[in-house]
Image (cartoon, rainbow, N blue to C red):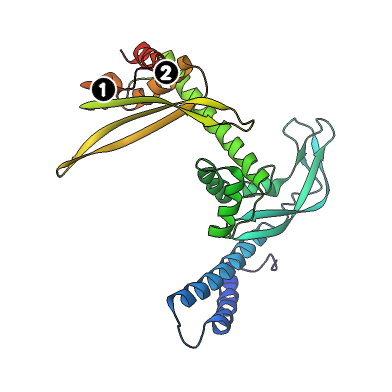
Amino acid sequence: MQDEHESKEEMVERLTRQFRELLEKKLPDEPGTLEEIEHVTEEIGAEIKREIENECLGWHGSGYLGSQITCSCGGVSKFKNHYPKQIVSLCGETTITRSYYYCSSCGESYVPLDVTLGLDSGRTSVGVRTKVGRLAAMMPFGDVSVELRLLCGIVVSSNTAWRIAESMGKRVKGERQERERLVLSEDVEAPDVAPGRLYVGIDGVHVPMYDGSYHEAKCGIVYQTVQEGDKIKISNAKYTATLERAEAFGEQVYALAFDQGVENAIKLACLGDGAAWIWNAECSYLF
């Protein structure tokens, strides 16, 4: 961590000299094969990113705000000590030192630097959690850990991947449920869109659970189509899936369709097989 009084211009000059030394050391005399070029550029790029991240983290210091601050409960949070914390970002793993405050009135702790950096109760950055969330939607948590390490050089355990995915899933579910509540309450106006034809598709698929059993996941898609040359392609597709009862699933599908202009659609096409729950879920809200 550099002197806190160092200006941005001074930091840029110092880092420029440092990166020049790095390039002189790491760049080969001859470019070599494409594989060799890729290897050296990845190595140099990773080192530069880590250094810049560490410098920017250093700007925040420890988050020390004085010997005491006002707690959200109205009481007084007192500074207790500085504690290190390992964090994992897109640039790898690093350790930061954070000022820790504690309020004896409500028993809550407060770490200003965690708030400033957007850290959760764990030790991963938003960027890492975003990548974990995308991968976890497509593969088991253990595989997420392996793929992150191989593709991005990011090391997290399968348990951490599970915790992140669960947390993100709950947040997405909460946001969708709030939107569904508003749509079904009729307290929101229909979007000012009028699709010529809106398609709604529903199907069920059995998915494996942790205990070895299989449960039926109800899956839905709402989309439009566009003409591209002699082909018709799906456009603006939105998806939903749940293990909940069919009635709740029908509400989810209707909320998706509502946001795509089902109330103003000239034509509505509903697609599904012969399962009774599919048509009960669609018909109760869409017709």
Dot 2 alpha-carbon crowd within 10 angstroms: few under 14, some 14 to 19, many 20 or more: many
- Indicate the quadrant where residue 68 lies: top right
Q: Is residue 89 above or below residue 32?
A: above
Of the residues shown, which amino acid type is indicated by label 2? Gly
Q: Which residue is drawn at 36% across and 16% down?
A: 282
Distance (Cα) linking label 1 and label 2: 15 Å
Residue projecting furthest to the bottom: 29
- Residue 278's place in the image compared with 56, above or below, is above
Q: In which quarter of the image is the N terminus?
A: bottom right
- x and y percentages locating residue 158 in the rendered image: 65, 46
Name the residue: 15% across, 45% down: 229
In the image, which disc is placed on residue 269?
A: 1
Label whose residue precedes the other's in the sequence (1 or 2): 2
Q: Nearer the viewer, residue 227 or 25?
A: 227
Q: Residue at left 40%, top 15%? A: 281
Give the percent coordinates (x, y) of residue 193: 26, 27
Work out whether residue 189 or residue 86 is closer to the camera in this orientation and state it.
Answer: 86
Q: In the rendering, at what x and y percent does residue 139 appear?
A: 53, 43
The secondary element bearing badge 1 is classed as strand
Which quadrant does the C terminus fall into?
top left
Residue on which disc 2 sits: 250
Identify which amino acid the numbered label 1 is placed on.
Ala
* Residue 103 figure quarter: top right
- Kindly identify the residue that appears in the image at 67 percent across and 43 percent down: 159
Which image quadrant is residue 286 in?
top left
Residue 261 appears in the figure: yes
Q: Is residue 194 visible?
A: no
